[in-house]
Amino acid sequence: MFKKNLSFLPIVLLLGLILASCSQNTKTEEEYLNTAKSLLDSGTAIKDDNLKKEALNLYKEFLTKYPNSAKGIFAYNQIAGIYFDLKNYDESINTYKELAAKYPDTKDAKNSLFMVAFIYDETMKNKEKAIEAYEEFLKKYPKDTEEGEKLSESATYMLQNLKSGNNMEDIIKKIEEQEKKSGTDKKEEPKTDSKTPQEIKQNRTLEVKPETDANVDTKK
């Protein structure tokens, strides 16, 4: 009798594995996103790269299980931002490129291609790649089309800046020197831009900061 019962053991184990597998496969979109958010929201996530990597894997798994989800753009942005925080800039760039390729007609695609150039320029200090990325960006987005948007404007300015060999600090210094000579407190706006370099750099950083904001509402 005992031996007979043992013969059913493999079947029971197999059923258990199947049920466990089914349970994992039925994880909802919100469960993936909320779990990843909880990991990033935890107080130790700032210092613990392992928590960031766990969240990263959840977002990747989410995209695999739900490739056509309306939250896909959010997940891609989170992945790119986490890679950036982990200082894996190449993977951050690759993820932004993937986002732009999959959602070409969205505002996020424009933001992503700008981020590619931004990382090459400001983070990796790769002038050649930055110029190439800015040119590619401006070829697709020569002008800003939405009110308050400054990405194309900033890309044009930064491309000219890179090609001239000047850096942002040098340009700011020259403007300040011109102000002293002219005896006026009003800053003279560069012909190629409607904003001062300080404003452009500040606006650009605020607009395109890699998105790993765990406070974003995933239910929108």
Image (tube, grey):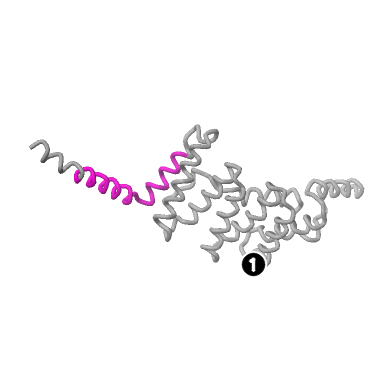
Q: Is mark 1 on a helix, strand or loop?
A: helix
Indicate the position of residue 207 as horizontal and vertical percent values: 62, 51
Q: Which residue is drawn at 32% across and 47% down?
A: 24
Describe residue 29's horizontal placement relative to residue 115 as left or right: left
Query: Residue at image x 67%, y 67%?
Result: 139
Q: Nearer the viewer, residue 190 or 50?
A: 50
Q: Which residue lies furthest to the right in this view?
A: 181
Q: Where is residue 167 in the image (x, y as percent from the top left)?
A: 79, 49
Residue at image point 26% right, 48% down: 18
Between 142 and 202, the residue placed more toward the observer is 142
Occupied quadrant, residue 105: bottom right
Q: In which quarter of the image is the N terminus?
A: top left
Front residue of 19/3: it is 3
Whether 188 is among the magenta residues is no
Q: What stretch is highlighted in magenta?
A: 11-39
Q: Main secondary structure of the magenta part?
A: helix
Residue appearing at x 59%, y 48% in the figure? 210
Residue pushed farthest left? 1
Type of residue at label 1? Lys
Q: Name the residue under label 1.
A: 140
